[in-house]
Image: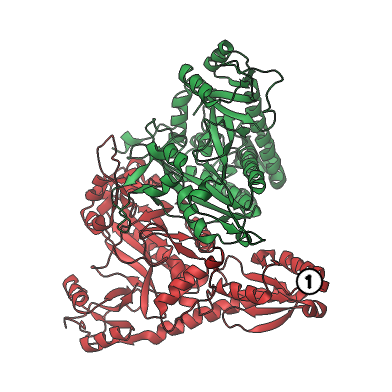
Chain colours: A green, B red
């Protein structure tokens, strides 16, 4: 029985041939995640969750720096709350999961939160009294549920996922605007610095903005198979929710004012994004800053040098504690097996140490992304590792950036647009900005959506016309297929 | 309107007079928590959530040291899973919240997790192949839902709460036993070292053990109003769940074996416990190791010395960065108002600095628990603070320990037992251990339950008889009222 369960370690299809199948095998075999016995849900296994913890640690630091505090609001939201902000209710209604048990006090149906604007702003309206209480900057790390009908894709599409949602309140729209952009740039930095993932960033169209927002900013990554992934959004909610929830405050002059609000979020999607961007046919390639363990040490053991080799490995492990090294001293596996396993699991640097290395006072270092080997003197390791890791990060980011750049194509008419969609390009074009025109595009051209009007370079071309309807362009915009 | 919302800062009842009302006002006015607009739920406001993060940070370190890895499993559990382990289903059935939407694949009802044994062990049965995979030690930090009908009590009783649940699998029961106790001792240490809360610790009776466990270990704190709080439990699940979920593994000899399992958990209850234990009529008294900010600096500002005083305060803040100091430089509040607010919020040490202090090169330090004042030279602060904090921790723990000790009463007959229950004592007595007898006690004596058979000193007294039924005693045990 146990034999029948023996796992096939390697990924059996190639990334360049069948990315969907490759991605699924990658996530399952590297033990990042597993499907759950509940339709639409998945399990973050320890390695997958450790990546989420890396994102949390990075972003908690950034939020603290920005004056944001973490809190926790209930999972259940009364139905009536959704209807207070009409657009919001409409946007989320089809995907809400409801609890069979009712709230005995109100007799209301309870939703499992798909997002928490309404329940959080109900509290804000109780807490907010005066300008002294502003700005409010609160975040929560939470699970959310959206009753998706599309097929589950590990990390990218599921009924339950983990995210953070920041909810801020400001005295006026100038402050609000500034921080809506500021948190977007924090997300962009996170992608670049932690995940080595380049993004385009800008504003969503009226059609694609968040239900209930004045406008939505977004960061979008671009995958090797020519599809974009929306990685994070930052919404200016204006005063809509504040009015719906009766929020006001006394300003310095004693007048009652209505505040402006924002919300912003990133999710476990980021894990899928980074993994799909960088990994290869041997398995995960984790960007060094993202990898929970930067180094794995694999001793090459022969009976007569066993203690000396293991002793040196332990010594190296202790010296490199800062890099959270794994010492793989399991007796039951051979070095070659271990090499494969740690490649599958994406550890950035493998250090091998056998009797010959011991004699030479060195280790063999293998870098995960290129597979390049080099010998490093044991006493040079602490200095050499940061350099190897930084170079690896830069290579990975640059390679992804070049890929994205190479896929951008300027298009100014419908025929070229359709061709570019088929070729899975990241299409840059002129657009009228009208909801009707965008709906027409969505209906007539399969699987393409607008991604964003870039913050830098989003102004319309001089004399530019909408590629679809021919009206005057109001912006330069990206379209593509997407996850 | 804003005026009507002005908050009454102080707590208006005394802890010693009406602890329930005092506790509620304490939690609300210190802004630890707030009631939610959903029956049975509450909000962890930033200060309350920061305390939860302190518990997470402490315990994540301990778990890492013990080889435990974090993961995340789905919120939803198929109904059939509960029925695989019959006792477990029975134990949880009345309190489960169900989702109105069904699983389209199985047509099954889905529960919102009240605890995750079943859904986690379903995965374990897929993942576990061989002795090489053991032990499995996985933890998740998650929200859980139990559809309580008793009144909500902030942190102590609610329909949704946050917790961690550890789930381990071992080759044999010897390993399992050892670690069931080990994680209990970790919990005891957490209470003592982080929360300055003394606990009794031991085994639950057959009647009170976890639904589906072979046995349950527990830690129990004892509150100033004479009621115990169960603070954490560690269960030896034996092979019951393993058999129910078809878990087995190949041992070193190639034979198929059934593993042994444990689960263990602590929750946001710990926040309520520490807060109720230590706080006073002025507000929170946070144990120094638990407090997110150990120090608050309040400048005493006069116009002509403003810059110098603020400059020195900033300098002190930077030098004490390790203690996460708050510098309260708000212009809109007077020092006296600030003193009250930070006392309400329980910051362990307040440093005051005015023009006279500046001249004397000192600060006035006030310790939260005793209110004692002293002058400390600015250059001595870094050395003096750890001493003040350690002394405060020790005082708080010792005071709680003495209170608990003073409430323990040895009882050997039913009349004395009833009297001790009325006097809200922590009753130590002899017990037959039989479920029937314990049910009889519960029925006839209002509000008392067995707490635990202590790990140290739980053996029966020589010739001892059960205080209730007169049969031979099998253990020394604690009974009391409880939250």
As displayed, is residue A401 above or below residue B448? above
Question: Is residue A225 something one can see in this rendering?
Answer: no
Residue B379 or residue B203, whichever sits in front: B379
- Check disc 1 and report the residue beneath it: B309
Q: Where is residue B128 in the image (x, y as percent from the top left)?
A: 35, 43
For residue A190, which quarter of the picture? Answer: top right
Residue B391 relative to residue B273: left or right? right
Q: Which of B226 and B130 is in front in this view?
A: B226
User: Residue B53: in sight, yes or no?
Assistant: yes
The local crowd at label 1, few if under 14, some if 14 to 19, many if 20 or more residues have their Cα within 10 Å, is: many
Give the farthest residue toward the top. Answer: A415
**Would you say B200 lies left or right of A292 here?**
left
Q: From the viewer's perspective, is A152 left or right of B6?
A: left
The residue shown at (58%, 37%) is A215
Q: Which of A73 and B289 is in front in this view?
A: A73
Residue drawn 38% across and 85% down? B407
The answer to which image quadrant residue A96 occupies is: top left
| Quadrant of residue B206 within the rendered picture | bottom left
Q: Mark 1 lies on which chain?
A: B
Q: What element carries label 1?
A: helix
* Above-or-below relation of A186 to A136: above
Horizontal and vertical percent for residue B417?
Answer: 25, 85
Q: Position of residue A392 (x, y in %)?
A: 66, 35
Residue B371 lies, with reference to residue A228, above or below; the image says below
Please identify the quadrant where the N terminus of chain A is shown. Answer: top left
């Amino acid at each position: 029985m146990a034999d029948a369960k023996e796992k096939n370690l390697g990924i059996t299809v190639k990334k360049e041939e069948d990315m969907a199948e490759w991605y699924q095998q990658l996530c399952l075999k590297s033990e990042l995640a597993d499907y759950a016995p509940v339709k639409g849900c998945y399990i973050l296994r320890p390695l997958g969750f450790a990546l989420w913890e890396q994102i949390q640690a990075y972003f908690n630091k950034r939020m603290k720096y920005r004056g944001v505090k973490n809190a926790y609001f209930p999972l259940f939201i009364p139905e009536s709350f959704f209807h207070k902000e009409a657009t919001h209710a409409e946007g989320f209604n089809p995907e809400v999961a409801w609890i069979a048990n009712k709230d005995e006090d109100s007799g209301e149906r309870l939703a499992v939160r798909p997002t928490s604007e309404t329940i959080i702003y109900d509290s804000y309206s109780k807490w907010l009294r005066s300008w002294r209480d502003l700005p409010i900057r609160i975040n929560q790390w939470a699970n959310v549920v959206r009753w998706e009908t599309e097929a589950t894709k590990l990390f990218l599409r599921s009924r339950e996922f983990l995210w953070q949602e920041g909810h801020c309140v400001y005295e006026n729209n100038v402050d609000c605007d500034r921080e809506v952009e500021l948190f977007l740039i924090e997300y962009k930095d996170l992608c670049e610095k932690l995940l080595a993932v380049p993004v385009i960033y800008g504003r969503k169209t009226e059609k694609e903005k968040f239900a209930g927002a004045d406008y939505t900013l977004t960061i979008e990554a671009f995958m090797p198979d020519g599809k974009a992934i929306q990685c994070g959004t930052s919404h200016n909610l204006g005063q809509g929710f504040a009015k719906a929830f009766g929020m006001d405050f006394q300003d310095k002059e004693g007048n009652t004012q209505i505040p402006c609000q924002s919300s912003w979020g990133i999710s476990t999607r980021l894990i899928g994004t980074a993994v799909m961007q960088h990994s290869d046919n041997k398995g995960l390639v984790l960007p060094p800053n993202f990898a929970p363990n930067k180094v794995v040490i694999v001793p090459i053991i022969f009976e007569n040098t066993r203690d000396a080799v293991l002793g040196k490995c332990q010594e190296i492990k202790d010296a490199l504690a800062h890099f959270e090294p794994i010492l793989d001293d399991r007796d039951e596996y051979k070095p070659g097996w271990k090499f494969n396993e740690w490649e599958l699991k994406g550890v950035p640097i493998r250090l091998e140490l056998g009797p010959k290395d011991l004699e030479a006072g060195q280790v063999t270092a293998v870098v995960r992304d290129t597979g390049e080997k080099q010998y490093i003197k044991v006493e040079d390791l602490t200095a050499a590792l940061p350099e190897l890791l930084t170079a690896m990060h830069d290579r990975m980011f640059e390679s992804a950036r070049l890929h994205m750049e190479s896929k951008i194509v300027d298009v100014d008419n419908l025929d070229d647009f359709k061709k570019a969609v088929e070729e899975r390009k990241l299409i840059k074009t002129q657009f009228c900005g009208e909801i009707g025109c965008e709906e027409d595009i969505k209906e007539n051209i399969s699987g393409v959506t607008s991604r964003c009007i870039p913050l830098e370079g989003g102004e319309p071309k001089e004399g530019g016309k909408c590629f679809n309807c021919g009206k005057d362009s109001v912006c330069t915009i990206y379209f593509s297929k997407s996850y």
